[in-house]
Image (cartoon, rainbow, N blue to C red):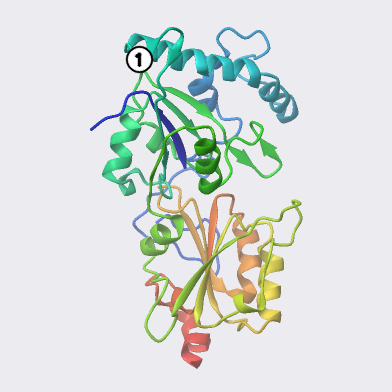
Amino acid sequence: MALLHKLAPFSSLHSPFTGKPYFSPPRRHLVSFSASPFTEKHSLERYQRDQWVYEDSQTMSFPPPSDSGSVREEDIALQLPELKKLLEVLREKRKSEGKCSGGECLPGNVFLVGTGPGDPELLTLKAVRVIKSADLLLYDRLVSNDVLDLVAPQAKLLYVGKTAGYHSRTQVFGRGGEEMDFLQQQGIQVKVIPGITAASGIAAELGIPLTHRGIANSVRFLTGHSRKGGSDPLFVSENAADSDSTLVVYMGLSTFPSLAQKLMLHGLCPQTPAAAIERGTTLHQRTVFAELKDLSEKITSAQLVSPTLIIVGKVVELSPFWPASTKEESCLMQT
């Protein structure tokens, strides 16, 4: 998701690993797996975009030091002057537009924009229009580089992303609802522009219907995060192990082994079809298909990295990319 500040309103990748059950859609082109379509925490692109913040700072070297701990400390140390500089940029922009009087400036607009799973062609027309006309854009790790290419040259960008064990800043971004609530409490007008969710976009890319008559009558989105950074997911209820439902797990690479065991313990068939999709809808997409009991091992073997979406349910077998050799013994054939 991207948070945009608009100062004036406007009216196959084939897997490199061998052995079944790996398969990736042939539409994707072969690319280097060392590259990333997203903004990684110490990427050169991140510091190039944010360089305007550090131009007058004596505490930030450029390019940044390679040690992750020192980069983290410098990021935090810079936040107060960084925020002051953001306010200065916005204030000067308002003054140039004649929207300030007596030292007071009229408030602008903030947009919370859903930017989708990564493919810029999946953006809504409204999202593209707002991104192109924004004056300031705060973006997290999962706003792809292709989407950021749409930002106007004169706009200011600031990275506020986080990964496991590394938050580039104190909690600026949480969930969309939390962000909207905080801004409204400050008297700031907020508009939300929804995007295609990763679950819908990536599942559709693979030909997986999240619900399907006679196979899955509901879908459940789960967070794979552990609140304390451990290996157990936040919450898995007995109801999550429903053979007639589809489970979509966000951010679940580290906790999925525990999640899979709990789902099977609560009665979900070990042969339930499942898929893990790394960097879905981008040219770097990689996909692993396997039965639930085997998916954790296959994810490890394939060395999938974040962001990876995991889909569990009988509907996965409806994908044209599901390995045909496993269909005879699947849970779908048993129902």
Q: Is residue 332 above or below residue 99?
A: below
Q: Is residue 328 above or below residue 279?
A: below
- The residue shown at (59%, 50%) is 305
- The residue shown at (45%, 80%) is 216
Evaluate whether residue 21 shows in this view. Answer: no
Between 212 and 31, the residue placed more toward the observer is 212
Number of marks drawn: 1
Q: Amino acid at mark 1?
A: Lys
Between 197 and 27, the residue placed more toward the observer is 197
Is 23 placed left or right of 75 in the picture?
A: left
Q: Secondary structure at mark 1?
A: loop
Residue assigned mark 1: 99
Is 4 placed left or right of 294 in the picture?
A: left
Between 17 and 82, the residue placed more toward the observer is 82
Between 275 and 133, the residue placed more toward the observer is 133
Residue with the most extreme left position:
11
Q: Position of residue 275 (x, y in %)?
A: 52, 67
Q: Position of residue 269 (x, y in %)?
A: 60, 84
Q: Position of residue 294 (x, y in %)?
A: 63, 73
